[in-house]
Image (cartoon, rainbow, N blue to C red):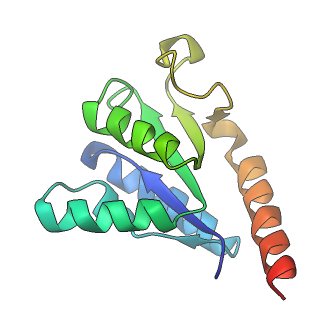
Amino acid sequence: MAYSVFISATRADIELARDIARRIKEAGVRVFPVEKSATLGQNILSTFKKELHEADEVIVLLTGRSVDSPSIISEIGAAHGLNKRVTPILINVEPRQVPPFVSKDYVKFTDLPKYISGLRKRAEEERSSAA
């Protein structure tokens, strides 16, 4: 199975999430549809749980609009509870604004290309070990 990433974002940040998902897909990494992670509803909730469980890594978009969002905080907790690698991406947010329980292994938006390169390497390593 291909290395996969789940992107956690609020509805307000959906366009940004789509852009990041596109970049990650171009690097050869599977990305779960971001529309589902940024929408509420019972059917979406069960899909969210399934995809989060299947994902190898969870990216959390932390923007000025989402840094204190209860749904984002909940998704971070769920990802940690499943022992997922959680990578916050800071966009117009200073490190001091990040809640203390969020990983300090964050990526600043300006460093996104370097992070995606690392994702590509993890995906390639997984493909190699599966072969």
Seen in the picture, residue 123 relative to 79 is either above or below; the reply is below
Q: How many dots with numbers?
A: 0
Query: Along the line of sight, which residue is nearer the eye, 115 or 72?
Result: 72
Residue located at (78% from left, 48% from top): 114
Q: Residue furthest left?
A: 42
In the image, 31: left or right of 106?
left
In the image, 102: left or right of 38?
right
Whether residue 35 can be seen here? no
Residue located at (51% from left, 21% from top): 101
**Split into 4 quadrants, where in the image is the C terminus?**
bottom right
Residue 23, image x, y percentages = 61, 64
Seen in the picture, residue 34 relative to 40 is either above or below; the reply is below
Q: Quadrant of residue 103?
A: top right
Q: Quadrant of residue 52?
A: bottom left
Residue 120, image x, y percentages = 76, 65
Whether residue 82 can be seen here? yes
Seen in the picture, residue 61 relative to 3 is either above or below; the reply is above
In the image, 103: left or right of 19?
right
Residue 98, image x, y percentages = 50, 19
Query: Along the line of sight, which residue is nearer the eye, 25 or 55?
Result: 55
In the image, 4: left or right of 99?
right
Seen in the picture, residue 124 relative to 103 is either above or below; the reply is below
Residue 68, image x, y percentages = 33, 23
Q: Residue furthest bottom?
A: 131
**Split into 4 quadrants, where in the image is the N terminus?**
bottom right
